[in-house]
Image (tube, rainbow, N blue to C red):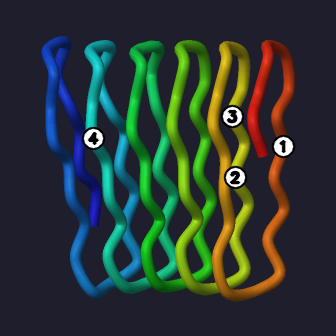
């Protein structure tokens, strides 16, 4: 399933299937729930959680807070001063540019 945010501050949440969540330009909250999800920020200071499944999280620009959750996740902060964490599973954390906390 596909879910899209708007230009404001949105909360976008996936479901038990594999989801694609594209957040808007505001300071958004995105969560994948179960399934292997792709969650992509779009420039705000976003809070992104993969939750269960093997997820790919992309923060883009902005100062993002990102957590992979359970599963083998890729957490890519992009530019900005990001806070990145994994959880259970073999996770890859990519800070990129900015002063990041892993």
The residues tagged by marks 2 and 4 sit, at their Cα atoms, a distance apart of: 15 Å
Q: Are marks 2 and 1 in contact (CB under 8 Å)?
A: yes
Give the structural element (helix, strand or loop) at label 4: strand
Q: Are marks 3 and 4 in contact (CB under 8 Å)?
A: no
| Upstream in sequence: badge 2 or badge 4 | 4
| Residue at the spot of label 3 | 77
Residue 20 in the image: above or below residue 78: below
Give the structural element (helix, strand or loop) at label 2: strand
Please tell me which residue is depicted at 32% across the width and 14% down the height of the picture. 25
The residues tagged by marks 2 and 1 sit, at their Cα atoms, a distance apart of: 6 Å
Rendered image: mark on residue 75: 2
Toward which corner of the image does residue 46 lie, by quadrant? top left
Please tell me which residue is depicted at 46% across the width and 31% down the height of the picture. 41
The residues tagged by marks 3 and 2 sit, at their Cα atoms, a distance apart of: 6 Å
| Upstream in sequence: badge 3 or badge 4 | 4
Q: Are marks 2 and 4 in contact (CB under 8 Å)?
A: no
Q: Are marks 3 and 2 in contact (CB under 8 Å)?
A: yes
Toward which corner of the image does residue 68 lie, by quadrant? bottom right
Where residue 77 appears, x then y in whole percent? 69, 34
Give the structural element (helix, strand or loop) at label 3: loop
| Residue at the spot of label 1 | 94
Give the structural element (helix, strand or loop) at label 1: strand
The residues tagged by marks 3 and 1 sit, at their Cα atoms, a distance apart of: 6 Å
Taking 99 as reference, is 71 left or right?
left
Please tell me which residue is depicted at 36% across the width and 66% down the height of the picture. 32
Rendered image: mark on residue 29: 4
Please state the total of marks drawn on the protein image: 4
The residues tagged by marks 1 and 4 sit, at their Cα atoms, a distance apart of: 20 Å
Mark 4: few/some/many CA within 10 Å (<14, 14-19, 20+): many
Q: Are marks 3 and 1 in contact (CB under 8 Å)?
A: yes
């Amino acid at each position: 399933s596909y879910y899209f945010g708007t230009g404001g501050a949105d909360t976008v949440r996936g479901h038990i299937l594999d989801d694609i969540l594209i957040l808007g330009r505001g300071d958004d909250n995105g969560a994948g729930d179960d399934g292997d999800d792709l969650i992509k920020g779009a420039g705000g200071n976003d809070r992104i959680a993969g939750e269960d499944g093997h997820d790919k999280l992309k923060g883009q620009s902005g100062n993002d807070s990102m957590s992979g959750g359970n599963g083998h996740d890729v957490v890519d902060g992009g530019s900005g001063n990001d806070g990145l964490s994994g959880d259970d599973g073999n996770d890859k954390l990519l800070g990129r540019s900015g002063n990041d906390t892993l």
